[in-house]
Amino acid sequence: MTLTEILRDSNYKLTQFTSEQIQTLEKNIFLKEVRGKQVPYVNCLVRRKDIQLKPEEAVRQLYLMVLNEQYGYSFDRMEIEYAVSFGREKKRADIVIFDKQDTRSIYIMVELKKPKLKDGKEQLKSYCNATGAPIGVWSNGDSISYYHRKDPNYFEDLSAIPSATEKLSDILTERWTIEDLVKKDKLVTEKKSLKDLILEMEDEVLANAGVDVFEELFKLIFTKLFDEMESGRNKSRHLRFRNYGDTETELKEKVQEIFDNARKKWEGVFSEDSKIMLTPSHLSVCVSSLQDVKLFNSNLDVVDEAFEYLIGKSSKGEKGQYFTPRYVIDMCVKMMNPQVHETVMDTAAGSCGFPVHSIFHVWEQILKEKGMPKSHLFTSEEKPVECTDYVQNKVFAIDFDEKAVRVARTLNLIAGDGQTNVLHLNTLDYERWDEKTEDEQWQDTYYEGWKKLRKLRTTKNSNRDFNFDVLMANPPFAGDIKESRILAKYELGKKPNGKYQTKVGRDILFIERNLDFLKPGGRMAVVLPQGRFNNSSDKAIRDYIAEKCRILAVVGLHGNVFKPHTGTKTSVLFVQKWDDKLCPKKEDYPIFFATQQEPSKDNSGEKIFVKYKSWESKKVKENKEQRIFEKLKKDNINLDSDGKVNIPKDKLDEYIFDDHNHLIVKHDLFNHDGLTQDGIAEAFLEFAKKEKLSFVGK
């Protein structure tokens, strides 16, 4: 009998354990007849007696192996089902390890009964408080958490537990470089997301800290990004956003100093007098939660998800403006194919997904041309001067939500090495831009970017028309514009009889405004509600678009893509403005249509990730599918004589990670680094080549 079968209907998993540990336990399973059924048993490593192997027991036996083999704790120092007294009531702790000197004191407490972290941590805290144990561990076989009990109220995260030959202080004072962070990144080793950690911090500390949660977490993420970048550019430097056994006051002074340096380097996100408002003890807990997380990756997905959650709590959803999932953005960028000499604009930037991913797309072209590899720390390392030049001179973004602009500026300031063209303006109300741009306070932050944007105006003193090569945006859907002053500026603000309407959907005005930003021959990808493509009442909008541009493609997105924020069905419209040279006008031409089949998220809005079973029985050609071939080889998975993949049973439900230890979202929008099937983007690029569109190679 296999452990996969035993764990099938439980919330426990085996991803924390090696295949050797799993095989060792499986070899020791035997069946006993209990009430006419064959039931799996194993001889317990600590109790030395036969125990029924239920899901929790399987995880416990495997974790006993980890404690013994990896950390060097002898089974003699352990006890199973240890009785913890709560007044008259007694509860049973899963595993305890006794102190080496004081053999009746509990040193480490392990909780496996509760497969959800929140429940498990509560149970663990109560056991640690009742016994005085300084170290606690929770695991469900998939995620794992290590805690240092500082006092009954605060449990700080640990990077790991000390081995049998180490003291707790050795773990706390161990100096880390960026390479250590790459190896021990909590998001990989403990199978957590930054959003999970933020939720934990909110529950534990922030909800009662009397501070603006968004602001304080933003400051900490901002500070940690700066610390990682400093070490990304000097690999021998020790990371400073860590508690190396500092007192709480010393730690606060140190983190404030890093924040001050970051604020000076990346101006215009926090005011000059900004201070971290968390108390030293609250800050200490937050630092311990974040210090083992690598925020910089080959993309900024980790940070994106955290900011999406934080901004979503405050302002975004109310205005019908939702963050575009990064895989939808990547599809658009691949299809629009921005080049190093081209300007890019996002008129409803949010956290700047379209500009940032356009930057990555162009950076990869630059690095490829120079024969330079793309590493784990792609976003934090120093890059060729062409990379920063591109960000500083070609990439622009606008948003009217001040919090979103600050987040977007942070991501762009990193990419642009301290310079960015992300501006706080109301895209639709361009008539009033001059009031903003003449404001001294606004100029302090945004003037450099504004100066560059002005140079791209079609007419010197008009803020209506610009000369951008590429525009990608997901404008807000909800709400109507009712101000006659604004409506009077737009063709789409009129009725067919020429009179102005009393209200117009915000996204409709964005269509016209976005086209104003494009030069002749410029191209656009814009996310729109599905109704704009098929409602009979929206025919005038479709006619307006067809008159101004060539419709290149319409891609229908799955209804789950924007969940949990909204179930609105959306499509992406791709167009190119008519131009005698780049896109000569035609009356009749083919249009590329596609619909996303893989949902990418479940009905509750949680992402669905690719598992090894998607490769089962797949025929892999070494030259054509080199990336899959290399990955299979690395994972010791064999092909049969026909070249078909044979995935071991215990691996079928495991997730596939890419080269940068990122999970891969299950979608059919494009091929993820050669590890998934070609998708909609690749099919469009073939179509674009056949049609000889100006922006794709032959």
Image: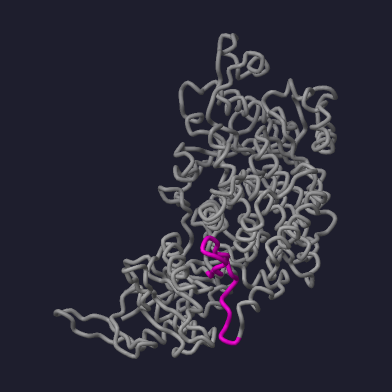
Residue nearest the viewer, comparing 197 with 581: 197
Coordinates of residue 472 in the picture (x, y in percent) = 65, 39
Count of marks placed on residues? 0
Q: Is residue 483 left or right of residue 559?
A: right
Coordinates of residue 249 in the picture (x, y in percent) = 71, 60
Residue nearest the viewer, comparing 508 with 23: 23
Residue nearest the viewer, comparing 478 with 332: 478
For residue 395, above or below residue 170:
above
Q: Which residues are magenta?
A: 146-165
Residue found at x 69% / y 39%: 405
Q: Is residue 295 left or right of residue 149?
A: right
User: Quick check: can you spot residue 41?
Assistant: yes
- Which of the 4 image quadrants contains residue 652? bottom left
User: Quick check: can you spot residue 649?
Assistant: no
Q: In the image, is residue 570 part of the stretch drawn in magenta?
A: no
Question: Please, which colouring scheme is shown?
Answer: one colour
Q: In the image, is residue 164 part of the stretch drawn in magenta?
A: yes
* Farthest-out residue, front: 87
For residue 189, above or below residue 280:
below
For residue 687, above or below residue 42:
above
Residue found at x 18% / y 81%: 34
- Which of the 4 image quadrants contains residue 37? bottom left
